């Protein structure tokens, strides 16, 4: 009984190790995208605060945050063009 549990634990941890090794890059990319989105949210918050004086604003949502976080200032310009010209 104890030998079967030990074997199952060894096999389970082995499979978990293989799964984590396979998912290492996608998890790294997802974390990096999440970090960029966080910086995008911060930038959009500051932009909306300063842009209120000029009458410019963008919505705070995940898509805008990711575009802003990944592309920076050119991403904000594209989002403003899409908002105000289309």
Image: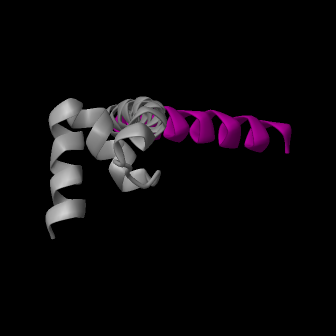
Identify the coloring.
Answer: one colour
Query: Is residue 26 rendered to the left or right of residue 59?
Result: left
Horizontal and vertical percent for residue 27? Answer: 41, 37
Query: Is residue 34 rendered to the left or right of residue 68?
Result: right
Residue at point 23% right, 52% down?
79
Query: From what the image shows, is residue 52 above or below residue 82?
Result: above
Query: From what the image shows, is residue 46 above or below residue 82?
Result: above
Highlighted magenta segment, given as a residue range: 1-23
Residue at the far right in the pictured view: 1
Horizontal and vertical percent for residue 72? Answer: 24, 31
Q: For residue 7, what is the image quadrant?
A: top right
Most foreground residue, 20 or 13:
20
Residue at point 75% right, 44% down?
4
Horizontal and vertical percent for residue 5? Answer: 77, 42
Q: For residue 22, what is the image quadrant?
A: top left
Q: Quadrant of the C terminus?
A: bottom left
Horizontal and vertical percent for residue 3? Answer: 77, 37
Query: For residue 31: magenta?
Result: no
Residue at point 38% right, 44% down?
65
Q: Quadrant of the N terminus?
A: top right
């Amino acid at each position: 009984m104890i030998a079967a549990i030990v074997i199952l634990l060894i096999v389970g941890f082995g499979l978990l190790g293989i799964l984590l090794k396979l998912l290492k890059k996608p998890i790294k990319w997802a974390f990096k995208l999440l970090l960029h989105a966080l910086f995008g949210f911060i930038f959009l918050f500051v932009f909306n605060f300063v842009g209120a004086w000029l009458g410019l604003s963008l919505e705070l949502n995940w898509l805008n945050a990711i575009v802003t976080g990944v592309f920076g200032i050119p991403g904000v310009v594209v989002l403003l063009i899409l908002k105000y010209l289309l």
